[in-house]
Amino acid sequence: MRATRAIIHLDNLAKNLEAVRQKIGPKPKICFSVKADAYGHGAVPVARYALEKGADCLAIAMVNEGIELRQAGINARIFLLSQALPEEIDEIANADLIPLVSDRNFIKMLDTSVKKQVEVHLKIDTGMGRLGCQPEEAAGLAIKIALAKKLRLGGVATHFAASDSLKKSDIAYTKKQIQRFEEAVSSIRKAGIEPGIVHAANSGALVFHEDSYFDMIRPGIFLYGYPPGPVPGVEPVMELRSTLVSIKKVRKGESVSYNRTWIARKNTFIGIIPTGYADGFPRGLSNNHSILIRGKAYPLAGRICMDQCMVDLGSRPEAQRWDEAVIFGPGFINAADMAEKINTIPYEITCGINKRVPREYKEGLPGKGARLKK
């Protein structure tokens, strides 16, 4: 057991899924993204729970992520969102992954390499400027897939570049992307090809662009508790906890931690917590974050170290050695609050919680009958 651990509140994950379903209605499918180890929350446990609570399928970014899910006995449809390498083609087929394809070369490579039928989805670049074919190429590529011996066109997809923004120019850009996508899908149908599942909406589009829901949505960070706008019933899923392992007295004028960036203004007590930037606690938050102990927030004192951080407990500390310390989580400072301070996004905070930090999966909120999920 480690003093520092990430608590994954599965009840909140279920609430977030329900909030999505309430917003989109009963028809569109929900593709739950568990790439990057479920944004740091743990891919296998999160995938199992999400499917149990109503997710229709899963999305990953790398072939080995899909293999991990299959080896764990997960039988749901799994979409591979990023471009695979040629040497991974056999693994794609063996793991029954559904790759997104966007060019003739890779389509041909798949068709001539796989030994069994593989479902693929055609990715169209409508303005992200990343993976995807041009909209005017969509019909031709759909025909090529339809004529392939080992491939089956199961759907058509795109991805939005700025759907989480309320700037007028970004709203207009997303609307243009939706229009381009609809025209590309229409061109596929006009070519006599059934496009299959049409999907585009990410977390931002889920909140701000209802006309992008189509047949399936692919929310990411929304489901982990960080929608791009206020949505009722959505709560952060991850909480990072540790333990106050030591308390020491520091005199006025003495410094704490590297480079002496914190100097005691008066006699005080410093608490040491064994969580540092090697655990994923960003060093950029040094002297700019608070930690919750016994219901009270204590400010960081000095630089966050690789394995430890320090808090100023004051001249008459209420906190005691071995008390639990909450670094971030539901009902306190969350990953979005932290991200704003260091000019990043909550994705980077949760994904950054290192593998050396054990995950604990619980149903029920703290103090309300929480229990370990086996």
Image: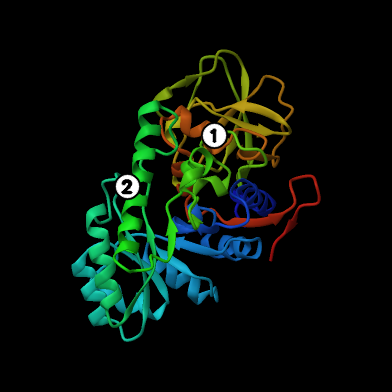
Classify residue 49 by image quadrant: bottom right
The earlier-in-sequence mark between 2 and 1 is: 2
Q: Nearer the viewer, mark 2 or mark 1?
A: 2
Classify residue 186 by image quadrant: bottom left
> Quarter holding the C terminus?
bottom right
Element carrying mark 2: helix
- Dot 1, crowdedness within 10 Å: few (<14), some or many (≥20)? some
Residue 124 vertical position relative to residue 336 in the rendered view, above or below: below
Report whether residue 307 is seen. no
> In the image shown, does 137 or 356 lie closer to the viewer?
137
Instruction: Indicate the position of residue 34 as horizontal and vertical percent values.
Output: 49, 58
- Residue that numbered label 1 is attached to: 229
Query: For the residue marked with disc 2, what is the amino acid?
Result: Arg
Query: For the residue marked with disc 1, what is the amino acid?
Result: Gly
| Rendered image: mark on residue 180 | 2
Q: Taking 34 as reference, is 232 left or right?
A: right
